[in-house]
Image (cartoon, rainbow, N blue to C red):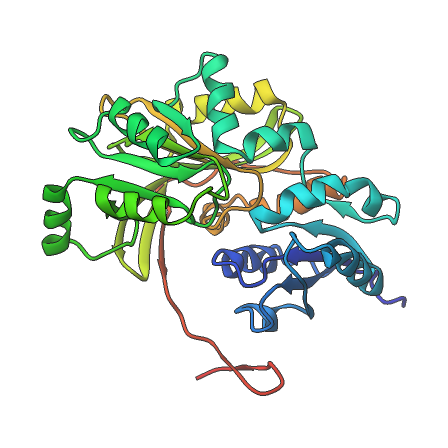
């Protein structure tokens, strides 16, 4: 009997916070064909031992990134690359044809659409121009513009957000709170590192000029936060799971619950349809003071909380692989009220990167 032919999938960002959950999803699919190869900038990436092969690669900003990745793909006979790092998406979209000519697919949308959804400023501007609800925001290039924009979105009566249009992984984003609110948080809440004072923001932004990215001042939405993970094909939604975020319990524990929300999911569907998006897409939304949901950003990749979808019966990472490989995608509705509790967990490896269990 011939040995089963295997399909090699390469995932970038082997050390990303969401990678343990992504790997759990793919293992849960129990598809023996899949062979997983991981790459990361960090040679000690947390999940390196979970892959059948692992390689260290340079940052996507380095000239050698594409060449090294292509060498790995040819060596490992990779059929599909799944980018799990936001900063790699633009570079991989640019060289998609180069890889496809070698028989290697890349799970990334077309450059024109990626250029919109991967830039928070362009996304919110596009939504506003298309009559879709967005938070009040202003794009700024220096501190004087930021200061004017802050007052325009309600400061100091209300908190506001300062964020980079191309930031990711909670980089270059902070909520600016009043001294009274900061004092309340200091005495009553465990810190999450996202809230700072107006004076701290000014010190930070004046210390580095010009800024590496365009920034925005955006009104702070005080309502419930939602995340929607979607698999789409040219504007048509194939699968969708909505999650309501719970409070961060501590610095190493958070919770969310799978829960349908008609307004939230309808808004996401409008964006997907109007932009004709494809692949795995993650929406972050929040309700305003009146309870109306508004899109804050889109992540055109597997999201950090996508494992909750799998627990609810919709294995979006595996469905995404089927989609990009051109296979039939069979979807079902998610089980409601599934709660995910995320906490830190230690893993132990020996000198040969073999897992030690205790």
Q: Nearer the viewer, residue 5 or 137?
A: 137
Q: Is residue 322 left or right of residue 17?
A: right
100 in relation to 341, above or below: above
- List the single residue furthest toward the bottom: 351
User: Which part of the image, by quadrant, shows the C terminus?
Assistant: bottom left
Q: Is residue 344 above or below residue 120?
A: below
Residue 107 visible from this viewpoint: no
Residue 118 in percent (x, y) is at 55, 36
Residue found 14% across the figure and 54% down from its top: 186
In the displayed structure, 209 sits above or below 54; it is: above
Give residue 306's position: percent from left, percent from top: 49, 47
The x, y position of residue 135, in whole percent, is 35, 24
How many labels, in total?
A: 0
Splitting the image into 4 quarters, where does residue 294 fall?
top left
Residue at 86%, 48% (x, y): give it.
Answer: 103
Left or right: residue 248 compared with residue 80? left
**In the rendered image, which quarter contains the N terminus?**
bottom right
Q: Who is closer to the viewer here, 52 or 28?
A: 52
Q: Is residue 351 in view?
A: yes
Residue at the spot x=48%, y=32% of the render? 120
Q: Can you say whether 197 is above or below 154 in the image?
A: below
Left/right placement of residue 252 relative to residue 4 reads: left
Residue shown at 77%/42% (left/top)? 96
Q: Which x, y percent locates residue 341?
A: 34, 56
């Amino acid at each position: 009997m011939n040995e089963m032919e295997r399909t090699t999938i390469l995932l970038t960002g082997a050390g990303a916070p969401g990678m343990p959950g992504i790997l759990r999803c793919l293992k849960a699919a129990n598809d023996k064909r899949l062979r997983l190869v991981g790459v990361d900038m960090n040679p000690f990436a947390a999940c390196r031992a979970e892959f059948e092969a692992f390689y260290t690669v340079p940052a996507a900003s380095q000239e050698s990134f594409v060449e090294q990745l292509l060498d790995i793909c040819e060596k490992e006979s990779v059929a599909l690359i799944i980018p799990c790092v936001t900063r790699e998406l633009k570079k991989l979209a640019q060289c998609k044809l180069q890889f496809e000519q070698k028989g290697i697919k890349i799970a990334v949308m077309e450059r024109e659409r990626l250029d919109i959804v991967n830039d928070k400023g362009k996304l919110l501007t596009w939504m506003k121009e298309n009559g879709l609800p967005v938070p009040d925001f202003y794009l700024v290039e220096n501190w004087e513009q930021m200061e004017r924009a802050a007052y325009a979105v309600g400061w100091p009566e209300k908190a506001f957000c300062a964020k980079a249009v191309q930031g990711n992984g909670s980089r270059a984003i902070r909520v600016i709170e009043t001294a009274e609110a900061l004092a309340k948080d200091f005495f009553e809440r465990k810190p999450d590192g996202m809230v700072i004072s107006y004076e701290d923001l000014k010190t930070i932004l004046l210390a580095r000029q010009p800024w590496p990215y365009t920034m925005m001042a955006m009104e702070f939405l005080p309502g419930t936060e939602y995340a929607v993970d979607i698999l789409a094909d040219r504007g048509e939604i194939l699968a969708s799971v909505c999650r309501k975020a719970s409070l961060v319990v501590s610095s190493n524990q958070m919770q969310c619950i799978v829960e349908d929300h008609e307004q939230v999911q309808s808004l996401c569907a409008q964006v997907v349809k109007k932009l004709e998006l494809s692949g795995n897409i993650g929406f972050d939304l929040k309700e305003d003071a009146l309870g109306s949901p508004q899109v804050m950003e889109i992540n055109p990749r597997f999201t950090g909380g996508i494992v909750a979808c799998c627990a609810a019966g919709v294995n979006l990472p595996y469905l995404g692989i089927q989609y990009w490989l051109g296979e039939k995608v069979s979807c079902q509705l998610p089980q409601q009220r599934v709660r995910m509790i995320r906490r830190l967990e230690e893993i132990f490896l020996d000198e040969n990167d073999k897992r030690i269990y205790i």
